[in-house]
Image: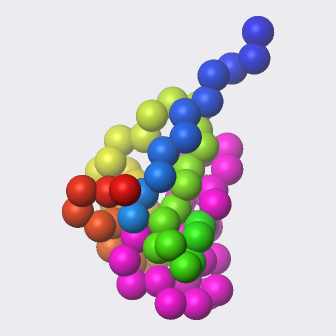
């Protein structure tokens, strides 16, 4: 049986260019259990597919490490 995945979308503030997209993608991809990260620069969102729900603190720390902020309240 295939493993279930969880997809969560987060609002990220401060992204303005493709470098921002790469930085956020790299940091979120490094979180345990993450299979895929899609960052939409125009929408200011990051959609993360993982093997289990990610703790918001971990996502917030990864986005912070990339130099951006997780918007309060999410998407």
Q: Residue furthest left?
A: 72
Examine the rendered structure and indicate whether residue 47 appears above or below residue 70. above
Displayed quadrant of residue 72: bottom left
Using the rendered image of the protein, determine whether residue 60 is visible from the camera's viewpoint: yes
Q: Position of residue 57 (x, y in %)?
A: 30, 51
Which quarter of the rendered picture does the N terminus lie within? top right
| Marker count (numbered) | 0
Q: Residue at x 64, y 60 (%)?
A: 38
Q: Residue furthest top?
A: 1
Q: Is residue 29 left or right of residue 55?
A: right
Q: Position of residue 39 (x, y in %)?
A: 59, 67
Q: Position of residue 60 (x, y in %)?
A: 34, 60
Q: Residue at x 35, y 41 (%)?
A: 55
Displayed quadrant of residue 26: bottom right
Examine the rendered structure and indicate whether residue 40 appears above or below residue 51. below
Indicate how the structure is coloured in the image. Answer: rainbow
* Residue 26 located within the stretch drawn in magenta: yes
Q: Residue at x 40, y 70 (%)?
A: 12
* Residue 56 located within the stretch drawn in magenta: no
Q: Position of residue 10 (x, y in %)?
A: 42, 57
Q: Is residue 62 left or right of residue 26?
A: left
Displayed quadrant of residue 20: bottom right
Q: Residue furthest right?
A: 1
Observer-nearest of 38 and 57: 38
Which residues lie in the magenta part?
12-38
Observer-nearest of 10 and 36: 10
Using the rendered image of the protein, determine whether residue 65 is visible from the camera's viewpoint: no
Which quarter of the rendered picture does the C terminus lie within? bottom left
Examine the rendered structure and indicate whether residue 16 appears above or below residue 6. below
């Amino acid at each position: 049986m295939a493993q279930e995945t969880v997809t969560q979308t987060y609002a990220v503030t401060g992204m303005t260019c493709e470098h921002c997209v790469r930085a956020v993608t790299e940091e979120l991809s490094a979180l345990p259990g993450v299979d895929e990260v899609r960052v939409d620069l125009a929408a200011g969102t990051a959609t993360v597919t993982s093997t289990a729900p990610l703790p918001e603190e971990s996502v917030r720390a990864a986005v912070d490490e990339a130099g951006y902020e997780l918007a309060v309240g999410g998407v």
